Amino acid sequence: MAEPADACYMWDMQKPVDPNYPEMRRRRFRPIPVRMLVPNVITLLAICAGLTAIRLSTEGRMELAVAAIVFAAALDGLDGRVARMIKGQSKFGAELDSLADFVNFGVAPGLILYFWQLHDLHNGGWIAAMVFAISGGLRLARFNATMDDPNKPAFAANFFTGVPAPAGAITVLLPIYLAFLGLPKPPALLTALYTLLIAFLMVSRLPVFSGKSVR
């Protein structure tokens, strides 16, 4: 037989919770500061640009697809600066930014290159596009894992390890830029090898100047 104290505890656990109770309302509906929302909205706009670039590439509208990637890169550089300016940094924002970088600068450029020319190589072109996307994901995962590493060398504050994802995405689309200028398309195999080279530079340990100290 339950003791009186245990019976009271069980009765409290079974008692329905009033959602209008002030304490519950404060706990459930905690307001989010606007300064936290602004950088995340910019990041979401960048994701929209990356997804739109994928759609445009499937429709063969490569000029607009590349422009969408460049726009996403501009937003990627803007959201972090805005967050630091208005003190709106958050763990959620950092994770959302990494997700946006993987979509915009890993998946989207790989698919754009595949629909532009790499599909001529069939499975080989698809593998090159996948390797580039995966390299972007690995590069971002390594960056997040070492962000708070106390044993980083002093020069690491001004340098990235490997080519950053936005720069890799802009660089890997170079064959398409040249085609826009009227130059003939390079062979599909050469484009695939170039894509793999940029993917390797992204996951390499090559120090790349970050420019964070430049004002």
Image: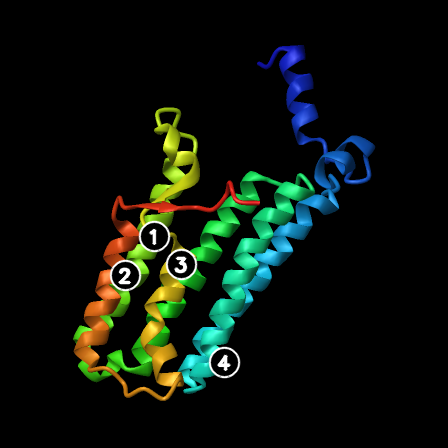
Mark 3 touches mark 2? (CB < 8 Å): no
Q: Which mark is residue 64?
A: 4
Q: Residue 173, percent across and down?
A: 36, 71
* Earlier residue among tags 4 and 2: 4
Tell whether 31 sits left or right of 66: right
* Earlier residue among tags 4 and 1: 4
Q: Secondary structure at mark 3?
A: helix
Q: Secondary structure at mark 2?
A: helix
Mark 3 touches mark 1? (CB < 8 Å): yes
Q: Which residue is mark 2?
A: 198
Q: Secondary structure at mark 1?
A: loop
Q: Quadrant of residue 84?
A: top right
Q: Which mark is residue 167?
A: 3
Label 1 neighbourhood size at 10 Å, few (<14), some (14-19), many (20+)? many
Label 3 neighbourhood size at 10 Å, few (<14), some (14-19), many (20+)? few
Q: Which residue is mark 1?
A: 163
Q: Residue 108, percent across and down?
A: 40, 68
